Amino acid sequence: MSIKTFLKKILSPPKPEPIIKETEYVKTPELPNWIKQKKKSHLQNETKILEPIKQRITEFQSELKTKIEIFENIDLADRKVEPRVRSIVKGNVDTYTNHLQKMIDKLGTINKREGIIKEINEIFNTFNAKTHISSQKISFLLPKEITAVRNAMAIFLKDLEAIFKSNKEDFEEFIVIQSVEKMIDEHTTLKEHKENLLEVINKDSKILEKSKQDLINQKKKIKALEESDKFKAEIEKKNNLESRKKKLEKDIYNLKTLIDFKGLSFFYHSFDKEMKLIKEYKENFKQNFQSMNTENLTNLLEGANLNNDKITKLIEKIKQDEKEIKDTKIDDFGIDKIKHQIDNLNKEIALTESRDEAKTRKLEEYNTELKESLDKIKSELEKLHVSLK
């Protein structure tokens, strides 16, 4: 068999054998402590399990050092090949032995069982990848030496396989315990996320409940105000005020029709200031009448002898109505403010409900993930004939 075959055979998960074993029952809340005790037991056996592995690694390191010395002491001068070929081979020998030394060093760092199979796998895979080309070029002149290294690796891996097999049950349990511990950590994290989300949902629920109650109270407040006699009286006052404003606009329009703008323009055509004022009144009578002093218009009319009692009385009436309208105060009892609060509450409720829907979906996802996570833990524990209850 090739080194690759041995490597694959050793590093592949061991196939379960049909062993009749009594099922051990563990309560779910007690599982973390059960794992802890199992890890403690494995830790106590760590030295015993690792001793033959480390001893075989030490022997293999010694063998590889011998192989390196052989390569370093080889004289390629007597080989009947072109100097260029010898130079190429020599360069590849240096590369090959350099990676052999790296393998020796890497194997020397192995001091614990956790991840040992993966670690050995990476060491050999790295070596094979780094020396694939150089070993082929070396084998052209040094086939026996290359074969000797490969045979040493094959025997080493076969010996490791035997050691692993002698502790097969212990290794399998160790791997499962590590896997379950990781799964428990993930399951615990999921539970914490779910609990945090539930706290947020409960908090939002209280906020939403309060917002809805506030909305009901504000609507009741508006209804009570709108049904009160005082509010109805203010509404009637407001309607009357609107009627007076319309009447005022009509009076202002009528006043404009009474003014002889043509006569004014004829009389003041040589006076720039007066003509400018007449033009402003003519183009936007309502605005300028309300914004300017009424004496401006009265002086223009009297100066041109175009004023009369009808115009004078109407001006006085308009100014009096404007003052009364301006002095009239309408009490809305804060309804506009309440309506604004109701709008804000409606928006807040809609936004909170929207967020709650998203959180509820996320909560369902957590429930599904927690169930799947627990099922995986149970499935993994079944490899050890352990059942959760």
Image: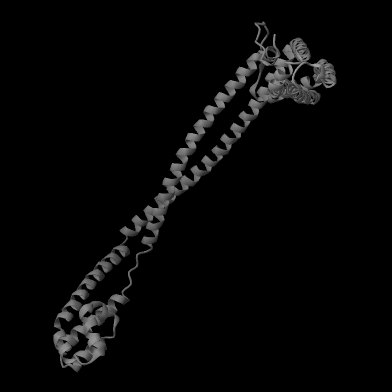
Count all numbered tags in the image, as a single digit.
0
Q: Specify whether 312 is left or right of 90.
A: left
| Along the line of sight, the residue nearer the viewer: 209 or 228 | 209
Quarter holding the N terminus is: top right
Q: Which quadrant would residue 135 be assigned to in this image? A: top right
| Along the line of sight, the residue nearer the viewer: 146 or 288 | 146
x, y percent for residue 137? 71, 19
Q: Which quadrant would residue 69 be assigned to in this image? A: top right
Q: Specify whether 118 is left or right of 214.
A: right
Quarter holding the C terminus is: top right
Q: Is residue 249 above or below residue 276?
A: above
Q: Is residue 384 above or below residue 334?
A: above
| Along the line of sight, the residue nearer the viewer: 95 or 363 | 95
The colour scheme applied to this rendered structure is one colour
x, y percent for residue 44? 81, 20
x, y percent for residue 236? 26, 66
x, y percent for residue 57? 81, 18
Q: Is residue 166 above or below residue 271?
A: above
- Evaluate whether residue 296 shows in this view: yes
- Evaluate whether residue 389 shows in this view: no
Q: Is residue 159 above or below residue 352?
A: above
Q: Which quadrant would residue 5 be assigned to in this image? A: top right
Image point (67%, 25%), residue name:
181
| Along the line of sight, the residue nearer the viewer: 96 or 387 | 96
